[in-house]
């Protein structure tokens, strides 16, 4: 797929580390932690870098900062979900999970009509809109955190930031 939209990448610095945002004039395409992910994502999708974002990247940065500072619970940004039909369905479902709440992979699977939670985990691993598609709010049915692209410590920090009640039923502890 090639989208001739032109997009810019911006890094912001926060308690999460470096958060990269990629946006065009019309859509936010990518939010991730770490350097270089935004440009790699754009290249992998055939989206050229450069051009005017019409202020969208500024708005995305402002909303993400507000979220990280505790002043925002949801995002009001136009996003482009670039995945399979199944992945997009999972991501839209996860976007319905309220701030400060968690749901199990099985819950998401049932909502999207999937018999097993495993494909849901695969779809969440491909999430390119961290925070906006709040995959950190999806945990295992046994109370363990489950996977997260940025690691379990960061997943726990995000959940604590949101005030989610998590009971870890795991012999392993997570250091923050």
Image (spheres, rainbow, N blue to C red):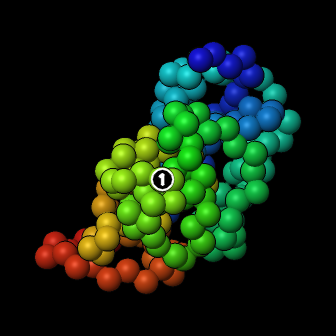
Residue 154 position in % (x across, y down): 39, 62
Q: Quadrant of residue 100?
A: bottom right
Residue under the point 85% across and 36% down: 54
Label 1 environment density (alpha carbons within 10 Å; few <14, some 14–19, many ≥20): few
Count numbered badges in the picture: 1
Residue that numbered label 1 is attached to: 113
Residue 31 position in % (x across, y down): 57, 45
**Front-most of residues 35 and 124:** 124
Q: Quadrant of residue 85?
A: top right
Residue under the point 69% across and 70% down: 72
Report whether 121 appears left or right of 93.
Answer: left
**On screen, 14 above or below 6?**
below
Residue under the point 56% across and 42% down: 88
Residue 150 position in % (x across, y down): 38, 52
- Tell me if residue 25 can be seen: yes
Residue under the point 75% across and 50% down: 77
**On screen, 24 above or below 155?**
above
Element at badge 1?
A: loop
Report whether 103 appears left or right of 80.
Answer: left
Report whether 156 appears left or right of 6.
Answer: left
């Amino acid at each position: 797929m090639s989208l001739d939209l032109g997009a810019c990448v911006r890094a912001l610095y926060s308690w999460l580390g470096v958060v990269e945002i990629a946006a065009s004039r019309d859509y936010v395409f990518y939010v991730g932690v770490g350097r270089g992910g935004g440009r790699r994502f754009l290249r992998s999708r055939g989206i050229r870098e450069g051009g005017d974002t019409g202020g969208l990247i500024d708005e995305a940065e402002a909303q993400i900062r507000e979220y990280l500072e505790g002043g925002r619970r949801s995002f009001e940004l136009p996003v482009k979900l670039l995945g399979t039909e199944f992945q997009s369905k999972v991501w839209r479902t996860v976007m319905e999970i309220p701030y400060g709440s968690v749901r199990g992979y099985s819950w998401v699977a049932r909502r999207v009509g999937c018999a097993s939670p495993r494909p849901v985990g695969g779809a969440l691993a491909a999430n390119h809109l961290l925070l906006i598609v709040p995959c950190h709010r999806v945990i295992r049915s046994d109370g363990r955190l489950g996977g997260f692209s940025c690691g379990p410590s960061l997943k726990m920090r995000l959940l604590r930031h949101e005030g989610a009640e998590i009971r870890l039923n795991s012999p392993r502890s997570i250091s923050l």
